[in-house]
Image (cartoon, grey):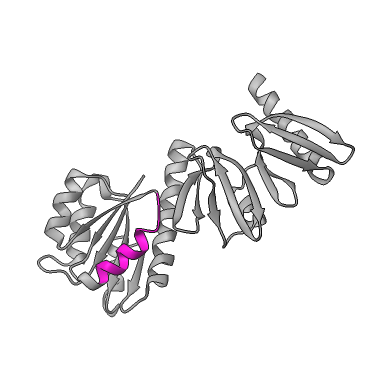
Amino acid sequence: MIKIMVVEDSEKDALLYKNVLNKIQGVEVYYALSGEEALGIAQREHFDIFVLDIELPGISGLQLAGKLRAMPEYVLTLIMFITGYTQNQLEAFKRFHCYDYIIKPFNSREFRKKIVTLIKNVNVEKQTKQRIKVILYPDINSEVLIPVDQITYAEVVHRRCFLHTDLQEEPFESNTIILKELIAEVDEPYFLQCNKSYAVNVNKIKTIERVNYRLWKIVLRDSENQLFVSSKFYDAIDEQIRVGVVDEKG
């Protein structure tokens, strides 16, 4: 779970942030109306990202950033500033190691682009520490953080991509990503295309049974659903299975 702190005294702006962040699964968001309130929460909880408005009642967003940077646990934490202007502030941004900023007025699409980039950066850092790779999957209702080793297979039906995982019984559904893009996003040797409309996590395969000279049936370890491998993709699937068997023995 990625924890985000948003410090904003404007109800209108806070509503925009909430509308974006509520659609991203795998994040926990805290909101504060002032720098003083934010500091109190930051001492009780640990955050991965701070979104700080510059103009705050009491201490400013810049002063808040300075106080956060003085705390050992937040020396390198990602900070994004929200500001109405940048004149005479860029040097301050650099001084507090601001990772990004956004200038008011802005729309939800602009904010979403910025915050998703920061979330992905946190994912990379967490993956490096934990060696667990995660993708941000554009589900039709929200965006979902999914560990790639929890993916079983993906199928495309009528231009919609259904991602089957160990996380829930129903697949995650997307109408904005195609199979080729998903395979590239996962970027693991064990997640391979097995026919025109399917890709499979080879580690989830129990057996492969030959149907005819151009087609094989995949039996999955923990699912009754059946997939098929066409001759075009069989050699790559078979080779990766053999690699997995060798790794397990080794």
Residue 246, given in percent of the width and then of the height, sits at 70, 24
Q: Nearer the viewer, residue 138 or 42?
A: 138
Vertical order, 31 against 236 (above or below): below
The question of residue 20 being in magenta is answered with yes
Residue at 13% of width from left, 56% of height from top? 37
Q: Nearer the viewer, residue 114 or 108?
A: 108
Q: Chief secondary structure of the magenta span?
A: helix
Q: Quadrant of the N terminus?
A: top left
Residues drawn in magenta = 13-25
Residue at 34% of width from left, 65% of height from top? 19
Task: Decide if residue 99 is in sight here.
Answer: no
For this orientation, the residue located farthest to the right is 213
Say whether residue 56 is left or right of residue 107. Answer: left
Say whether residue 21 is left or right of residue 113. Answer: left
Query: Residue 22 falls in which quadrant of the image?
Result: bottom left
Query: Residue 120 falls in which quadrant of the image?
Result: bottom left
Q: Nearer the viewer, residue 37 or 67?
A: 37
Residue 180, given in percent of the width and then of the height, sits at 67, 55
Say whether residue 73 is left or right of residue 41. Answer: right
The question of residue 79 being in magenta is answered with no
Q: Nearer the viewer, residue 182 or 104?
A: 182
